[in-house]
Image (cartoon, helix red, strand yellow):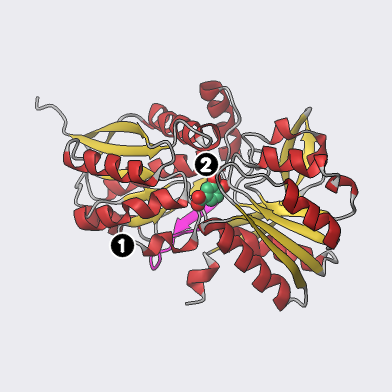
Amino acid sequence: AQAQQTVKIGLILPMTGPFAGAIGRQIEAAAKLYMAQNGASVAGKTIELIIKDDTGTPDVTRRIAQELLVNDKVSFLAGFGLTPLAFAVAPLATQSKTPQIVMAAGTSSITEQSPFIVRTSFTLPQVTIGIADWASKNGIKKAMTLVADYGPGLDAEKSFKERLTAAGGEITGEIRIPLRNPDFSPFLQRVTDAKPDALFVFVPSGLGVQFMKQFVERGLDKSGIRLIATGDVTDDESLDSMGDVTLGLVTTHHYSAAHPSPENKAFVEAFRKAANVRPNFMAVGGWDGMHLIYQALKKTNGDTDGTKLVEAMKGMSWVSPRGPISIDPKTRDIIQNVYVRKVEKVNGELYNVEFSTFEAVPDPVKAAK
Ligand code: DHB
């Protein structure tokens, strides 16, 4: 018998540096778990996963992607832990007609950088409008925003402002903090002095711990200023280590490890067994990215033509551990539920417990175009 042909997936992740724990290791573990559970063979082809560390640096991501395309002849580029890393590779995906599966990054415009980009993570506008709506309905009139100063932060700031002001609210201050080595303290002093009803925060996965620490050090937990955020701040990877100060914190996001579905219970249990930690939303983006690749190959009968694969992905839908999801055939972006959650203690551990749902939310920025 002839040996099966191999289809290679190049998975590029920050496996070292500040985003290794919350992003790289989570997605790596999820991708490996997916293959362990579903087999390393699909549509008569052997699947080979090649994992590379880009350290979270765009120039490195681009160089690695180039090597994976030229030397390894990968059929898929996947991963992209941060927005600039996804942007760096988009021109290569277009030139080489290779599907680029964005499993992590969340700036709305990413999918517009190449017709070969398909996203299984989320967009910041998608998850931010829900918390703005929740804030308006819960008596928050004056709010300040504090975001990491790059793509997803600017998206979150803009969406929150538009949505809150449309409902009659007011933004009384907008603070942007650097992504690298952020020090929140001086900015938190400004918030204390301004005394808004609420502070809305976006920082990427992994930075929430430091934010919460400085929030408490500055006494903001006792200031009467309500903290609200996207679920990036209460990321499952680190939430339990943030301590009881997070109890009651309301956020909106697309995934919680406490999501009460049979699919999620099975996912969390298997992930914990394999990786010894709780899966976060990055892990789910990686899991669904692998599912998307497997299903696309099934649909093309193992054909690795990039254009055919992307066509196969458009409109695909399935039940993820996060709930029902689909790929918008027009934008190649994900459509998914967004949940309103509150931090609670469950069996002695802190979790984002979902209490209401916005169903089948598209990326609102592209939906408005
Ligand atoms: C991005 C990264 C994150 O870790 C996150 O939580 C949200 C967005 C990004 O760079 O796009």
Relative depth, front residue between 113 and 294: 113
Spot occupied by residue 353 in the image (x, y as percentages of width and height): 73, 44
Pointer 1 residue Cβ closer than 8 Å to ligand 1: no
Vertical arrangement, residue 261 with respect to residue 161, above or below: above
Vertical arrangement, residue 33 with respect to residue 70, above or below: above
Q: Which mark is residue 115?
A: 1
Pointer 2 residue Cβ closer than 8 Å to ligand 1: yes
Residue 119 falls inside the magenta stretch: no
Spot occupied by residue 325 in the image (x, y as percentages of width and height): 50, 54
Name the residue beneath numbered marker 2. Answer: 282
Q: Which residues are magenta?
A: 324-335
Residue type (three-letter) at the residue carrying disc 1: Pro
Q: Residue at x 72, y 71 (%)?
A: 164
Horizontal side of 198 relative to 182 (left or right) equals right
Horizontal side of 64 relative to 120 (left or right) equals left
Q: Residue at x 23, y 50 (%)?
A: 300
Horizontal side of 107 relative to 6 (left or right) equals right
Q: Earlier in the sequence, mark 1 or mark 2?
A: 1
